[in-house]
Amino acid sequence: MNIKKVCVLGGGGFVGIHIVNKLGMAGYSVRVLTRTREHAKTVAVLPDVEVVEANIFDPAELNRHFAGMDAVINLVGMLNEEKVGRVDKPWRVAAIFMRFTLSCRARLCMLAPQAA
């Protein structure tokens, strides 16, 4: 398979910014899914990079954004943390992260046969 279009979840984060930059500079067409465009403003100016606000907990929305992509990279680290640096409820952050990770993996596994 010749990979030309890549969807990156978490492309506005610390690691994501660097990966999206490398992909964009290498000529890939990149779609970055983010909670808010502001998080991905650094990569939004790159050529062939599309930044899209998305609810990654919505399977139908993931289906729409994954459509036509040759590859998906998941770099999401932590979601819906109510306060930056929150330490009073670490179980909540861990539960949200696990919910997303399992949901995303299941969605990717379901989409893979359709894309083949």
Image (cartoon, rainbow, N blue to C red):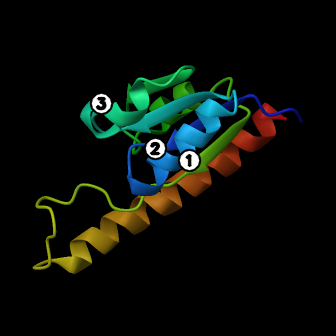
Q: Residues within 10 Å of mark 3 (few under 14, many from 20)?
A: some
Residue, disc 1: 19
Q: Amino acid at mark 3?
A: Arg
Mark closest to the chain's N terminus, 2 or 1? 2
Q: Amino acid at mark 2?
A: Gly
The reply to whether discs 2 and 1 touch (Cβ–Cβ < 8 Å) is: yes
Q: Secondary structure at mark 2?
A: loop
Mark number for residue 83? none
Query: Which residue is at 15% across, 62% downward?
Result: 84
The reply to whether discs 2 and 3 touch (Cβ–Cβ < 8 Å) is: no
Q: Which label sits in the foreground, 2 or 1?
A: 1
Query: Which residue is at 48% across, 39% downward?
Result: 59
Mark number for residue 37? 3
Mark closest to the chain's N terminus, 2 or 3? 2
* Residue 6 location, quadrant: top right
Q: Secondary structure at mark 1?
A: helix
Furthest residue to the front? 25
* Residue at mark 2 to residue at mark 1: CA–CA distance: 7 Å
Mark number for residue 11? 2
Q: Residues within 10 Å of mark 1 (few under 14, many from 20)?
A: some
